[in-house]
């Protein structure tokens, strides 16, 4: 954080995404996203971002008068909003909607099961489908990732099964019902969660990309391939039946699959050398 002065007024301003308040984060999360298609950096939009960054009210901002050189210096100080992207979990652990508190997942899918990871990707692919986008997909994505705290969370914390996740267990039927209720959730909160998911998911896919066929055309273009992966793991029996596979921590399951894949590739390479 640093201090900026305008006359007799001083403003504490953020120098990184992690220093923004939750409300500033909600309003400014669009900066890098919109800049990517070249439509954000207009004077009006830059001014709007600057006002939020400074924490000024619209009335105070309307009365502020800056010389061209002052505006130029100010622009340099909040340019990081357009040149950097957030990292890690946003400064929003929960949000309330219609009397229900929803909890966000831990960073890097640390408390995410294989089933909810698959469901989240299916919802995202439906939402982001360039040919036939499903506008309800983002609500299903939010409802998949963000869930109320389980009723027995205190007892769960004391149990041997404690995994750090206070959210209730993922249920597809509850997700569908809650997605409808979340349809009128404010767009800024949806975009915070969408951005958080995309960043986590890109890191996850980079780590386990070889499991998804590399450059080969996917067998299922609508996201069902995620569930088929879980089905194939269940066939092998290492993690139990399909239900147990679905509840396995995502990183544990996919790390095991990747290790098996690499072992098979090494064996194939050795066989090729013997021929």
Image (spheres, rainbow, N blue to C red):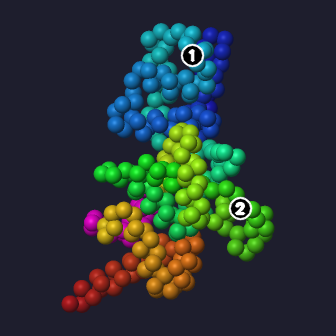
Q: Residue at x 55, y 84 (%)?
A: 240
The residue labelled by disc 2 is 150
- First reached walking from the N terminus: tag 2 or tag 1: 1
* Label 2 neighbour load within 10 Å: few <14, some 14-19, many 20+: few
Give me the disc on residue 129.
Answer: none
**Residue 17 in sight in this render:** no
Instruction: Verify whether residue 222 appears in magenta.
Output: no
Q: What is the quadrant of the C terminus in the image?
A: bottom left
Q: Are marks 2 and 1 in contact (CB under 8 Å)?
A: no
Q: Residue at x 49, y 14 (%)?
A: 70
**253 vs 4: above or below:** below
Figure label count: 2
Residue 222 appears at what percent x and percent y? Answer: 36, 62
**21 vs 267: above or below:** above
Q: Is residue 42 left or right of residue 256?
A: left
Name the front one of labels 2 and 1. 2
The residue labelled by disc 1 is 61
> What is the span of residues highlighted in magenta in the rendered image?
202-217
């Amino acid at each position: 954080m640093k201090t900026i002065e305008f006359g007799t007024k001083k403003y504490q301003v953020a120098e990184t995404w992690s220093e923004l308040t939750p409300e500033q984060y909600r309003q400014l999360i669009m900066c890098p996203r919109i800049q990517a298609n070249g439509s954000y950096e207009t004077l009006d939009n830059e001014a709007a971002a600057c006002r939020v960054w400074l924490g000024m009210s619209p009335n105070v901002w309307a009365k502020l008068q800056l010389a061209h050189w002052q505006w130029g210096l100010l622009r340099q100080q909040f340019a990081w909003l357009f040149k950097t992207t957030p990292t890690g979990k946003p400064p929003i652990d929960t949000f309330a909607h219609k009397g229900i508190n929803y909890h966000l997942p831990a960073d890097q899918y640390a408390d995410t099961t294989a089933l909810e990871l698959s469901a989240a990707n299916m919802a995202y692919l439906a939402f982001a489908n360039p040919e036939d986008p499903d506008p309800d997909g983002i609500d299903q994505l939010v409802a998949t990732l963000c869930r109320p705290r389980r009723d027995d969370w205190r007892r769960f914390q004391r149990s041997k099964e404690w995994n750090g996740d206070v959210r209730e267990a993922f249920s597809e039927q509850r997700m569908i019902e809650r997605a409808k209720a979340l349809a009128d959730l404010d767009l800024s909160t949806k975009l915070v969660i969408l951005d958080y998911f995309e960043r986590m998911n890109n890191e996850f896919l980079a780590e386990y990309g070889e499991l998804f066929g590399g450059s080969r055309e996917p067998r299922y273009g609508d996201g069902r391939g995620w569930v088929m992966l879980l089905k194939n793991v269940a066939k092998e029996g290492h993690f139990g039946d399909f239900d147990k596979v679905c509840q396995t921590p995502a990183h544990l399951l996919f790390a095991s699959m990747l290790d098996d894949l690499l072992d098979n590739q090494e064996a194939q390479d050795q066989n090729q050398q013997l021929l």
